[in-house]
Image (cartoon, rainbow, N blue to C red):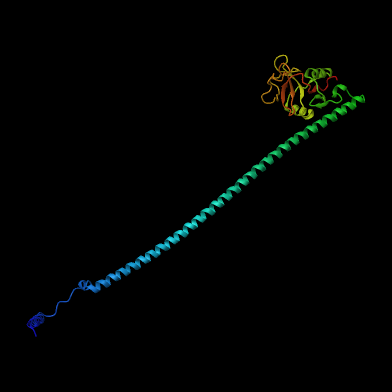
Amino acid sequence: MTKEYQDLQHLDNEENDHQHRKGPPPPQSLFRRLCSGPRLLLLSMGLSLLLLVVVCVIGSQNSKLQEELRALRETFSNLTVSTDAQVKALSIQGGNVGKKMKSLESQLEKQQQDLSEDHSSLLLHVKQFVADLRSLSCQMAVLQGNGSEGTCCPVNWMDYEGSCYWFSRSGKPWPEAAKYCELESAHLVVVGSWEEQKFIQHHMGPVNTWMGLTDQNGPWKWVDGTDYETGFKNWRPEQPDDWYGHGLGGGEDCAHFTDDGRWNDDVCQRPYRWVCETKRGRDS
C-alpha cells in the first residue's frame, strides 16, 4: 500500500470521527426539499400540464362560443332576409290593394256621373214628353174649334218653359238664319239658363248651331235685348277671341253652339244650323 493511499484513508477516518462527534445533520426545510432537483422538475411538469389543460379548456369554450355566435348570426341574417321579404310582399300587396281601391273609386265615380247624366236626360225626356203632349192637346183643341191657336206652339215647334223652339236641319249664314226666324215671328235663340242650354244642346245634336248673339255693331248683344253682361254664358276657354286668321275677311262677330254645346265666335257667313225661339202665347 502506498503512502498516498494511507494518507487519504487516514483523512477519511478523521472526517468520519469528526462527524460522529458532531451528531446527525439538521433536517432541511420544505421549500428547500421541494426546490431540490428532481422535485422541482416534477413540480414544473405538473404546473405545465395544468396550464395546458386550462388552455385547452378555454380554447374549447372559445371555439364553442364562436360556433354559437356564428349560428346566431346566421339565424339573425335569415330572419332579416325573411322579414325583408315579408315586408316587400306586404308592401306589394298594399300597393295592389291601393290600386284596386283607386280603380273601384274611379269606377264608382264614373257610374255616379253616368247615373246623374242618365237621370238628367230622363227628366229632360219626361219634360219634353209632357210639353209635346200639352202641345198636341192644344193643337187638337184648335182643330176642333175648342181652343185658341195663340196658346199653343206652332206645329213642329217644341214647347219648353213657356217658349217654343224650332231646330233647323240645314245650314245658313247667321244673317239669313236670323231673317228666317223673323219671318216666323221669332228670333234666333237666346239662352238664359243652364237648364235651357241643356235643352237646346240635347235637341240640336253635336253640330255647330247659330244662336242670337252677335257683336257686329259693337259689344256683344242678344237679339231680343236681354242683357249680355249679367246673363248666362257658356263660352269655350279663351273664347270669344275675334280671330282674323281664317282668311275670310274681318273678325268673328257671331256666336254659335259647338259640338259639345259650349259657345264660340265665328265668321257670320259660315253656313251653320240654327234655332228659332218665340214665346208661347204669341200669335203664330
Q: Is residue 159 above or below residue 35?
A: above
Decide which of 171, 146 is in the foreground and name it.
171
Q: Is residue 98 above or below residue 58?
A: above
Q: Tell me how many marks there are.
A: 0
Decide which of 6, 174 is in the foreground and name it.
6
How far from the left and from the top, in percent, is residue 202?
77, 30
How far from the left and from the top, in percent, is residue 46?
30, 71
Residue at 81 percent of width and 30 percent of height: 128
Residue at 47 percent of width and 57 percent of height: 73
Q: Quadrant of the C terminus?
A: top right
How far from the left and from the top, in percent, is residue 68?
45, 61
Decide which of 126, 256 is in the foreground and name it.
256
Q: Quadrant of the N terminus?
A: bottom left
Q: Residue furthest front?
A: 2
Decide which of 186, 3 is in the foreground and name it.
3
| Residue 276, quarter of picture | top right
Q: Residue furthest top?
A: 217
Residue at 27 percent of width and 71 percent of height: 43
Q: Residue furthest bottom?
A: 1
Residue at 38 percent of width and 64 percent of height: 59
In the picture, measured across the screen, residue 185 lies left or right of residue 231, that is right
How far from the left and from the top, in percent, is residue 110?
70, 38
| Residue 56, quarter of picture | bottom left
Q: Is residue 65 above or below residue 177?
A: below
